[in-house]
Image (cartoon, coloured by chain):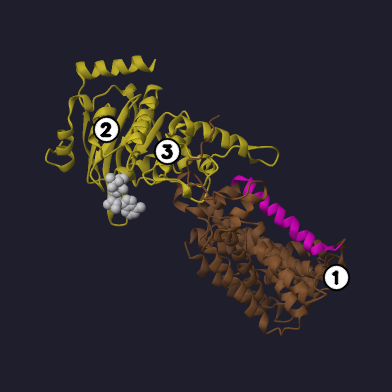
């Protein structure tokens, strides 16, 4: 094998950097790009430090447990959104799809289908929206933004029509276990979310499909010239997004105790924010799974911390918005 | 074996060669009456070319003559509106680039067809990844090793296979695209302006690669604007003008001046 002599442009390291394990880290930390790449973990650590100084309850086991459970839905949605955004698309209908899944679950449960079947109905009804998105975008060549803006409205409308605008109460013991069960401080929702995250990482970085997702997002023309079936990849990512929104719907119904035809816009904005915080570029081609998960944790910690400090609910969207804009500014300094 | 077949070719050339009258067994690829339009733009208006076994065939013509469009039809990216492509005498229809590859045709596209956000080794194997294990996971180790081997054979300054294409120089990118096409032991390698924008050393290396390919029995279709290069490397040359292949010559019996006249239309065919 050839020993690749480093001829490509290499990272410029300060010549006088101290040697040893820390040296590269110190060298990197002097560069803006390091902070830009690691915005989400650095932000998360920063928030945890600030909030634990300001509020004694923030770092208690009980609060950590609550935060992790609260983060689960957002993590699942962020992972889902990450697949779509890696292809250069965006799924604006993701939270409305989750609502459709929730209403689907509620109706199936009401009809006496039981937990497992109702869960399948939830995922299946969400997948219908995903399929419509995929076909519109991959076959109909409709812009992602417009197509999913349309299905956002359609899905919201369908959820309202089918539920008659009223929440459907669900008293399922399985759902109760899902929200309240835990292993140590890790509630079942967060465990489920982490399993989904691990699977998503595997699919994205260790399978042919994942490579094709990245290739189609990086340069559709080049990907196609190399035999990647870009339309199929696009349909697949919207199905993944919708399917995971269906799973998130179960977590949502479990948490609320009812299937509500609510709009859930906060979830939509926050999952896109988490993906951006996680270092995924909206232009596509650059895949991240861990980053968006940390981004989702960060946004949850932010909301939780502000609540603990008694900051009015009204300030929370403001804080989330500031964090996202800051992260977006930082991504400008990411290494290309 | 290749050496003798080349000598035979040259003998044919000297004794009884007439343009367009090669024995059928010598013809490896034959594209006939290929038409392709993009909306109102008639990029190909019925172009026909042939490639002979074991030879370097050049395709020349002015900008916009339709060379790349013909290449993209041959490599399965475009479907021709009409016309036939014969490979080894059999009619083939490539509806995807992978089908062309499966028939032993590799292409270096003019735009290189690299994905900038992916690493060199990922670009090498894009569309035909090696997998292993029960979950058909990517065989990353194997792919990296093979990509490094294929690159080391070709490149003057081979980039590390783990680096992203985005960070490579123009010459390095070209080397990656050429090594990717040259390394599969295929029948035909098509190169659309492979030495455009290359330095002297790199150009020499690429020309050497093209000759090595030919010497190992691969037939090469070379698109080039460099007449010296064409006269030096190619056995046969096709001239395209405004969507048609208007003339063919044995390079041994032609000259750079004649090619220029054919390209501009000063000489009709
Ligand atoms: N995808 C496309 N859509 C529309 N028009 C196209 C497309 N591809 C090629 N054309 C047109 O077809 C014609 C032939 O283009 P082509 O790229 O084949 O030329 P070429 O001979 O390769 O030129 P060059 O030497 O500049 O590479 C041009 O007029 C070009 O504008
Ligand atoms: Mg061209």
| Residue topped by disc 2 | B229
Residue B175 - label: 3
Which of the 4 quarters of the picture holds residue A100? bottom right
Marked residue nearer the N-terminal end (2 or 3): 3
Q: Chain of mark 1?
A: A
Q: Report whether B204 appears left or right of A288.
A: left
Boundaries of the magenta span: A185-208
Residue at 74% of width from left, 75% of height from top? Answer: A305
Specify whether residue A199 is painted magenta.
yes
Which chain is brown in the picture?
A: A
Q: CA distance from mark 1 to mark 3?
A: 58 Å
| Residue topped by disc 1 | A62
Q: Main secondary structure of the magenta part?
A: helix
Confirm if mark 3 falls within 8 A of ligand 2: no
Residue at 53% of width from left, 31% of height from top? Answer: A2
User: Observer-nearest residue: A2 or B262?
Assistant: A2
Asked if the residue at tag 3 contacts the one at tag 1, i.e. Cβ–Cβ closer than 8 Å, the answer is no
Residue at 39% of width from left, 27% of height from top? Answer: B213
Secondary structure found at label 2: helix
Tell me the shade of chain B.
yellow
User: Observer-nearest residue: A14 or A179?
Assistant: A14
Indicate the position of residue A157 as horizontal and vertical percent values.
Answer: 62, 77
């Amino acid at each position: 094998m050839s020993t690749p002599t480093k001829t490509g442009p290499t990272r410029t390291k300060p010549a006088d950097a101290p040697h040893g394990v820390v040296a590269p880290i110190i060298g990197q930390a002097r560069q803006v790009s390091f902070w830009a790449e690691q915005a989400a973990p650095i932000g998360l650590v920063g928030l945890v430090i600030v909030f634990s100084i300001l509020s004694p309850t923030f770092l208690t086991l009980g609060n950590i447990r609550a935060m992790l459970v609260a983060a689960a839905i957002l993590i699942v949605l962020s992972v889902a959104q990450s697949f779509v955004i890696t292809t250069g698309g965006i799924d604006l209908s993701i939270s409305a799809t989750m609502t459709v899944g929730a209403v689907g679950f509620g109706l199936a449960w009401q009809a006496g289908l039981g937990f497992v079947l109702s869960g399948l109905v939830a995922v299946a009804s969400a997948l219908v929206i995903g399929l419509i998105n995929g076909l519109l975008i991959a076959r109909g060549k409709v812009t992602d933004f417009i197509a999913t803006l349309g299905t956002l409205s359609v899905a919201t409308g369908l959820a309202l029509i089918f539920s008659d605008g009223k929440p459907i109460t669900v008293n399922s013991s399985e759902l109760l276990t899902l929200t309240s069960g835990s292993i140590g401080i890790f509630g079942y929702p967060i465990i489920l979310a982490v399993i989904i995250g691990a699977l998503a990482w595997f699919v994205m970085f260790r399978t042919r499909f994942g490579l094709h997702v990245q290739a189609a997002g990086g340069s559709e023309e080049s990907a196609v010239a190399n035999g990647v079936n870009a339309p199929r990849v696009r349909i697949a990512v919207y199905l993944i997004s919708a399917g995971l929104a269906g799973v998130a719907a179960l977590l949502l119904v479990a948490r609320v105790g009812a299937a509500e035809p609510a709009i859930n816009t906060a979830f939509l904005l926050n999952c896109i924010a988490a993906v951006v915080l996680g270092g995924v570029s909206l232009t596509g081609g650059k895949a991240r799974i861990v980053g968006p998960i940390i981004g989702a944790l960060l946004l949850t910690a932010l909301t939780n911390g502000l609540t603990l400090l008694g900051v009015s609910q009204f300030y929370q969207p403001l804080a989330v918005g500031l964090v996202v804009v800051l992260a977006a500014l930082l991504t400008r300094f990411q290494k290309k | 074996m290749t050496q003798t077949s080349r000598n035979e070719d040259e003998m044919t050339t000297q004794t009884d060669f007439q343009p367009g009258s090669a024995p059928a067994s010598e013809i490896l690829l034959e594209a006939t009456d290929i038409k392709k339009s993009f909306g109102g733009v008639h990029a190909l208006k019925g172009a026909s070319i042939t490639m002979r076994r074991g030879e370097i065939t050049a395709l020349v013509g002015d900008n916009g003559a339709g060379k790349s469009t013909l290449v993209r039809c041959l490599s399965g990216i475009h479907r021709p509106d009409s016309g036939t492509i014969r490979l080894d005498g059999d009619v083939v229809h490539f509806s995807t680039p992978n089908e062309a590859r499966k028939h032993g045709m590799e292409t270096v596209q003019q735009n290189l067809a690299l994905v900038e956000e992916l690493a060199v080794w990922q670009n090498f194997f894009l569309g035909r990844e090696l997998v292993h294990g029960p979950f058909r996971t990517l065989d990353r180790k194997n792919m990296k090793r093979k990509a490094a081997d294929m690159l080391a054979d070709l490149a003057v300054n081979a980039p590390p296979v783990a680096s992203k294409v985005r960070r490579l120089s123009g010459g390095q990118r070209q080397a990656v695209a050429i090594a990717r096409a040259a390394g599969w032991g295929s029948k035909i390698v098509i190169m659309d302006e492979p030495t455009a924008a290359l330095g002297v050393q790199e150009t020499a290396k690429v020309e050497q690669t093209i000759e090595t390919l030919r010497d190992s029995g691969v037939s090469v279709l070379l698109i080039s604007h460099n007449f010296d290069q064409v006269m030096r490397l190619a056995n046969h040359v096709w001239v395209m003008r405004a969507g048609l292949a208007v003339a063919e010559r044995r390079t041994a019996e032609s000259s750079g001046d004649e090619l220029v006249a054919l390209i501009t239309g000063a000489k009709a065919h």
